[in-house]
């Protein structure tokens, strides 16, 4: 269920607030160095401490999310962050009393890092679960940009205020406001850390009291997590199987790509972490050197103050505008080419590799420039390009693992992101600068260096980030496999095992099914092909291709013949679905849950004695006969374009009347209508005696075939069929409106069906019924992908 936009603002605000203190410390480098007496290595250690503890605590977050509610975990993390900031507030006072504040700063940053893990791990997972599909990359970009915005805000406030206590008190107030907003937020939009769906579970949900519009976007959840099995060529042939491999049910897991993209994101944060701490003193030195060479300096202190003010302003503008523009540019670009999931992932990787190459070029210009304004402009482009890579890279990282493992994957990725990325970017430039200071002031132990170039080597080390990221993207591009591409490799095994799996399912229904010839040989060959494919050898690939062609030829031969062997396989188009008697015999065998659906369908009906009832797509009368056995006094109208099936249905209805305890004189004669239901038109065949419509409309496995009938059925009766999700959804809406107009005020409609690929999900059925004007929409029964839904027309 997609969350409203204001919840994105809440999560991005939380993420930005958690980074405020790191940005403020970057502006207080001189204060820590000159006033509190810390060395550059000590400053780098303090800055890096949060990013050292964050990955250590990250694996604990998925465990906590399984035991506690998400909101509780996030609120506890907020409280811990406030404690960490409070420790920073008390540091200067401890220094004034004569004690060293170093230990307090390290502990405070460690607490902040541990508690920062909550939003760092769950923020991106929340976006992946709750963002609208067509805006997922943009929302993910906003989530990544929020941490950069927090750094900039903290840096700007600290740069202009220069009052340590005031700055971090602002951070405490921001945390408190976020705590209140999160505590008041609706839990259903905060979400759960797991997205898995329990297969085979029986769920009952009531929507009687749900306000209008509540079904919006729930169809996405139904379609994505309930309907992953592919539809057979003949929709009535598909056998429900719970043993389908996970690779066919959801995104293709590719752990090498996941690892490479985690390191790529780490390289981006390595650059970001280094720039936020060390760009300011580096640019100040470039500016002061230019002033000395061009016009000389008057008062050294006054000139330093002016340069500091200028650089703080420019760095604030750069780190605020460049990353913000970059993440939305990158997110929009990824969304425009189809997102980062599935087959579009390869195009996204190519786009990211191009961006990384450009980032290297501008990074070299920024870090080796001796012109202040050239460095400023190239730093802006360098930041922008790096940020533009984040949404696609982070999205590809999450898309490379199973949906139910995104929380754990996000937690594990925090280890390299923070240790190699943020902590490395904060510590390594400071360590290199400290080494140069030792070399220049250590009695000639190394090459001398004046103050103007102290930070140069440290900042240039940040160029390792885009280089390493580019290499990771190139390797990912070579190893990337989309679901469509995996059909040529891993899913070839699925094709080979399909006949055997389907025969195994059929064996549960038939007492003594015949076994396929040479079953043991096929099993050996399949196992051998699997081992060869896993070994990645050319012989294995050739074997898979050969067996694939052999099985396809065999399936084509079976489909083209007219012998009884078509009854044994479920390869489309197997069976004889065009034959009325065979259809009636095989329905329950091939779709065993249809019996349970019919039973629950009848139990869900209101009293129908004496009512006018119409059965859409009545077929051979299975549903009408079951309802007639319960309510023999009802007036039945059966609508179907196949006259032969309606004759069979009439026989069943008469047998049901004879078997009932009601006198034959009290049983109305069924009314048969040989016609197709047209989308958007009232139902045909309204019998005499009804005033304005039917009392109840029954549609058991009907609407799906009215909108998009099977190929053999559409050809036999000259029916139109809808193609594509949008046209199919429009067809459902028209059918529901036609049903609505054919009911008397207060009349009911009952739908019994199974979710099909490309067709609306369970919740989308509810939403379409609501759009048509129905009330009291209720899911009476649901198991696997079968369901029964009832609704009523207003009086």
Image (cartoon, rainbow, N blue to C red):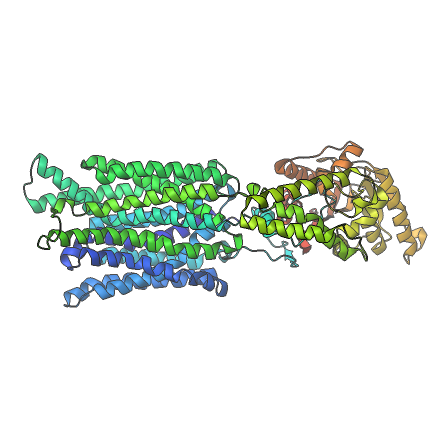
Question: Where's residue 780, x and y in %?
Answer: 69, 55
Question: Please, is residue 113 above or below residue 481 in the view?
Answer: below
Question: Where's residue 636, x and y in %?
Answer: 84, 46
Count of numbered badges drawn on the protein: 0
Residue 164, quarter of picture: bottom left
Residue 367, quarter of picture: top left
Question: Where's residue 487, x and y in %?
Answer: 59, 43
Question: Where's residue 372, x and y in %?
Answer: 19, 37
Q: Is 173 on the left-hand or right-hand side of 218?
A: left
- Residue at the location (55% across, 41% down)? 485
Q: Is 485 on the left-hand or right-hand side of 72?
A: right
771 and 49: which one is in front? 49
Question: Please, is residue 61 above or below residue 539 in the view?
Answer: below
- Residue at the location (9% across, 39% down)? 292
51 and 569: which one is in front? 569
- Residue at the location (80% across, 39% down)? 561
Question: What residue occupies the far left of the structure in this picture?
Answer: 298
- Residue 229 shows in the view: no
Question: What residue occupies the far front of the structure in this picture?
Answer: 539
- Residue 282 shows in the view: yes
Q: Is 251 on the left-hand or right-hand side of 116?
A: right
44 and 472: which one is in front? 472
């Amino acid at each position: 269920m997609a969350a409203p936009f204001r919840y994105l603002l809440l999560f991005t605000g939380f993420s930005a607030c958690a980074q405020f203190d790191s940005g403020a410390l970057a502006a207080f480098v001189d204060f820590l160095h000159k006033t509190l007496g810390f060395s550059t290595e000590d400053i780098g250690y303090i800055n890096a401490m949060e990013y050292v503890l964050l990955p250590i605590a990250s694996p604990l977050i998925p465990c906590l999310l399984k035991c506690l509610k998400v909101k509780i975990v996030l609120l506890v993390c907020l409280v811990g962050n406030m404690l960490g900031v409070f420790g920073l507030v008390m540091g200067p006072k401890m220094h004034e009393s004569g004690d060293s504040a170093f230990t307090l700063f390290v502990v405070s940053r460690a607490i902040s890092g541990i508690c920062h893990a909550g939003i760092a791990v769950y923020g991106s997972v929340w976006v992946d679960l709750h963002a609208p599909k067509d805006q997922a990359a943009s929302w993910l970009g906003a989530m990544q940009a929020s941490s950069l915005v927090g750094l900039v805000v903290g840096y700007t406030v600290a740069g202009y205020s220069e009052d340590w206590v005031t700055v971090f008190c602002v951070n405490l107030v921001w945390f408190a406001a976020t705590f209140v907003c999160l505590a008041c937020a609706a839990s259903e939009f905060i979400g759960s850390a797991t997205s898995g769906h329990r297969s085979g579970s029986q769920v009952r949900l009531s929507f009687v009291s749900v306000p209008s519009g509540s079904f919006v976007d729930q169809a996405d959840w139904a379609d994505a997590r309930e309907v992953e099995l592919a539809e057979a060529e003949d929709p009535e042939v598909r056998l429900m199987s719970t043993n389908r491999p996970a690779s066919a049910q959801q995104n293709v897991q590719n752990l090498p790509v996941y690892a490479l993209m985690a390191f790529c994101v780490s390289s981006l944060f390595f650059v970001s972490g280094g720039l936020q701490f060390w760009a300011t003193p580096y640019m100040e030195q470039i500016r002061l050197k230019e002033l000395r060479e061009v016009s000389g300096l008057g008062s050294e202190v006054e000139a330093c103050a002016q340069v500091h003010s200028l650089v703080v302003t420019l760095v604030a503008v750069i780190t605020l505008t460049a990353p913000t523009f970059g993440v939305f540019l990158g997110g929009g670009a990824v969304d425009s080419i189809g997102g980062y999931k599935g087959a579009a992932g390869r195009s996204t990787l190519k786009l990211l590799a191009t961006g990384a190459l450009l980032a290297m070029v501008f990074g070299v210009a920024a870090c080796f420039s001796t012109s202040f304004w050239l460095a400023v402009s190239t730093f802006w482009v360098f930041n922008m390009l790096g940020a533009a890579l984040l949404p696609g890279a982070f999205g590809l990282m999450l898309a490379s693992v199973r949906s139910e493992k995104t929380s754990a994957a996000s937690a594990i990725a925090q280890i390299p992101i923070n240790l190699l990325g943020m902590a490395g970017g904060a510590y390594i430039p400071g360590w290199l600068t400290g080494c140069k200071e030792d070399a220049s002031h250590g009695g000639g132990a190394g090459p001398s260096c004046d103050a103007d170039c102290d930070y140069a080597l440290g900042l240039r080390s940040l160029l390792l980030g885009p280089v390493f990221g580019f290499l990771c993207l190139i390797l990912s591009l070579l190893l990337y496999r989309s679901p469509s591409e995996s059909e040529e490799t891993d899913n070839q095994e699925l094709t080979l095992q399909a006949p055997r799996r389907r025969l195994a399912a059929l064996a549960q229904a038939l007492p003594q099914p015949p076994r396929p010839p040479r079953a043991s040989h096929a099993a050996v060959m399949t196992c051998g092909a699997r081992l060869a494919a896993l070994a990645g050898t050319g012989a294995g690939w050739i074997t898979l291709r050969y067996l694939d062609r052999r099985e396809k030829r065999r399936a084509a031969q079976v489909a083209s013949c007219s012998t009884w062997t078509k009854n044994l396989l479920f390869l489309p188009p197997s069976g004889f679905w065009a034959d009325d008697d065979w259809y009636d015999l095989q329905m329950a065998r091939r779709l065993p849950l249809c019996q349970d659906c019919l039973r629950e369908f009848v139990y869900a009906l209101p009293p129908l004695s004496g009512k006018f009832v119409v059965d859409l797509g009545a077929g051979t009368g299975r549903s009408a006969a079951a309802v007639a056995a319960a309510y023999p006094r009802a007036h039945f109208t059966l609508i179907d374009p196949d006259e032969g099936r309606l004759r069979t249905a009439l026989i069943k209805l008469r047998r049901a009347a004879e078997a009932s305890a009601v006198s034959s004189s009290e049983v109305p004669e069924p009314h048969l209508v040989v016609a197709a239901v047209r989308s958007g038109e009232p139902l045909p065949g309204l019998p005499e005696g009804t005033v304005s419509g039917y009392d109840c409309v029954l549609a058991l496995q009907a609407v799906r075939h009215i909108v998009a009938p099977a190929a053999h059925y559409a050809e036999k009766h000259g029916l139109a069929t809808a193609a594509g999700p949008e046209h199919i959804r429009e067809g459902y809406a028209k059918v529901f409106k036609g049903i609505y107009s054919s009911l008397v005020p207060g009349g009911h409609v009952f739908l019994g069906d199974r979710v099909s690929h490309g067709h609306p999900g369970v919740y989308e059925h509810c939403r379409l019924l609501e759009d048509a004007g129905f009330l009291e929409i209720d899911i009476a029964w649901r198991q696997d992908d079968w369901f029964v839904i009832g609704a009523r027309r207003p009086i």
